[in-house]
Every structure is written in C-alpha cells, then in structure tokens.
Image (spheres, helix red, strand yellow):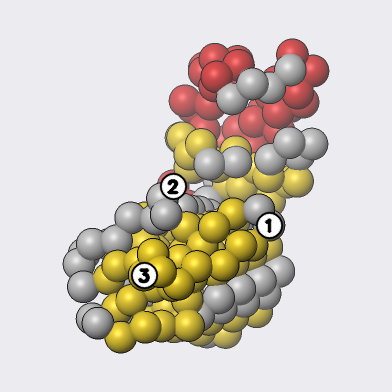
Amino acid sequence: MIKLNKKDSKQVDGETLYRVICNGDETEAYASENCYFSNDVIVSGGHFRGGTFHGGTFHGGVFHGGTFHGGVFRGGTFHGGTFHGGHFHGGTFHGGTFHGGEWRQSPLFIQGSVHPVTLVEDNQVYIGCEKHHINHWMVNYRKIGRKNRYSEEQIAEYYKYIKLIKEVTDEH
C-alpha cells in the first residue's frame, strides 16, 4: 500500500510535495498531492521527485530525479535521475542516465516553442501531455492546440512538426 504522509512536506519550485509511504515505511521519495497510487499502477500523473522507484508501473506524470529500477515507464516525462533496466514505453526522456532496459522504438524528439514533440512506438505522438496516433493529430491538431491555449502561430508551428512526423512514419 502506497500513500502520502501529509505531515512531512517540502516546497519544490512552488509546489508542495509530500513524503511517500510504501507498506508503512517512509521512502526517500516525495510526490505531489495529485499523484495517484494503487496496487496495480504505482504512480499515475502528478510529480514524483527523488527517491527510488522499484518495479511496478509509472504511468504519465513527471519523474524528477531519483532512480528508476525495473518496472515499466509508460508515457509522462523523465527528468534527470537514473533509469536502470525495465521498459521505457513512450514519454519523453530529458537528461539523466539510461542503463540497460529496453526502448521498444527509438524515439524521435523535437523541442517546440511550447512543449516537446515525441514520436514513440506504434505511431503514437506526444505533444506535451497529449498523446494520440499521428493520424488523429493530422485531423485534430487545431482543436487540440486551441484546447491547450496555443496561439495560431504556435498551432501552425506544431502542424509543421506533425506533418514531418507523418512523412517519416509513412516511409516505414
């Protein structure tokens, strides 16, 4: 059972993070209040900073620093830290060190003016936290851009990236 200790908190970049408790034992990790913990999915959404992640699945959210041992990283953003073994499925890897493990497909990464653009396995594309198949992006890019408060210039910029990725994926 994983939960947060609301009596042990710290401020990081203006955000309150709480100590993570796993099976009654305090860990070195801190997580934001909007992290979701369950027995099947260890972390879903929110922020995970520092500490060590052993096994399980990290689904979405932001992993900041710390060490990832085994398990599955699905989507989200990995900032710094060390990735040991396990499987990295999609998401964005910023800095840090990747030891062993498996990339199911070498990702294509473009740093846009607002969010990164990452092509991951099975023609799935992340722009920021939005993940869709490239064909969905081709049809819905304007609607998604407006929903995420992109300017018309930014929507045009990101459409160029989407068209490039579509061209690349059509060649394979």
Q: Can residue 57 be seen in this view?
A: no
Between disc 2 and disc 3, whose residue precedes? 3
Q: In which quarter of the image is the C terminus?
A: top right
Q: Distance between the residues labelled 2 and 3?
A: 39 Å
Q: In which quarter of the image is the N terminus?
A: bottom left
Could you tell me residue 156's position as x and y percent? Answer: 74, 19
Query: Which class describes the residues within 10 Å of circle 1: few (<14), some (14-19), or many (20+)?
Result: few
Q: Mark 2 points at which residue?
A: 122
Q: Mark 1 points at which residue?
A: 13
Helix, strand or loop at mark 3 = strand
Three-letter residue code for mark 1: Asp
- Residue at 66% x, 53% y is 14
Q: Mark 3 points at which residue?
A: 5
- Residue at 68% x, 40% y is 115
Q: Nearer the viewer, residue 133 or 21?
A: 21
Three-letter residue code for mark 2: Asp
Quadrant of res 79: bottom right
Query: Which class describes the residues within 10 Å of circle 2: few (<14), some (14-19), or many (20+)?
Result: few
Q: Distance between the residues labelled 1 and 3?
A: 19 Å
Could you tell me residue 49's position as x and y percent? Answer: 55, 69
Three-letter residue code for mark 3: Asn
